[in-house]
Image (tube, grey):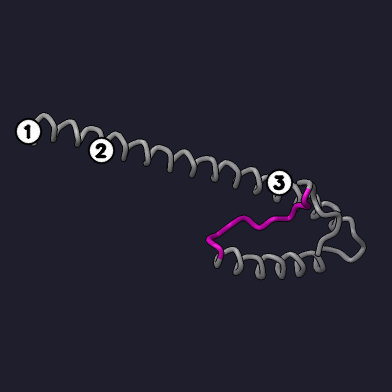
Amino acid sequence: MGLGSIRSFLMKRMTAVAEEILNALKDNIIEYEQEIERLKQENYCLRSALTETCHDDRGMVWFNSRLQHRYSAGWSSARSSGFRALRNTSKDGGCHSDVP
């Protein structure tokens, strides 16, 4: 095997590795963008629930305890599943009508 063929082999191999890296990077960026959209939707839902609950006769004490319970339970499950986003959306992408 001559120097030229070794150089050619290495160039092909490095090009293939670079393509693999770029594809993995592209996939990660797509995942992060989807995660951002899910988090935006969750924030919208939580803000809506907060606004609705602030006007509730039961007051913020009820809301704060429910929210704390929801996130303490969701946080541990999110941590164990690789910090996946907590989802507060229905199958059609809308917000739940009630605060669990």
Is 36 inside the magenta-drawn segment?
A: no
Residue 41 badge: 3
- Which residue type does callout 1 highlight? Gly
Please tell me which residue is depicted at 84% across the width and 56% down the height of the picture.
54
Distance, label 1 to label 3, CA atoms, is: 59 Å
Q: Along the horizontal axis of the image, is 46 left or right of 37? A: right
Residue neighbourhood size for the residue with mark 1, other residues' Cα within 10 Å, grouped as few (<14), some (14–19), many (≥20): few
Distance, label 3 to label 2, CA atoms, is: 42 Å
- For marks 1 and 2, the one nearer the N-term is 1
Quarter of the image where the C terminus is located:
bottom right
Quarter of the image where the N terminus is located:
top left
Q: Which residue is identified by label 1?
A: 2
Q: Along the horizontal axis of the image, is 73 left or right of 57? A: left
Please tell me which residue is depicted at 60% across the width and 43% down the height of the picture.
34
Name the secondary structure under disc 3. helix
Residue 81: where, in percent of width, then height? Answer: 56, 63
Mark 1 or 2: the one toward you: 1
Name the secondary structure under disc 1. loop
Q: Which residue is identified by label 2?
A: 13
CB under 8 Å between discs 3 and 2: no
Q: Along the horizontal axis of the image, is 55 left or right of 11? A: right
Q: Of helix, strand and loop, which mostly describes the magenta segment?
A: loop
Is 87 inside the magenta-drawn segment?
A: yes
- Which residue type does callout 2 highlight? Arg
Task: Examine the rendered structure and indicate whether residue 58 appears above or below residue 13.
Answer: below
Residue neighbourhood size for the residue with mark 2, other residues' Cα within 10 Å, grouped as few (<14), some (14–19), many (≥20): few
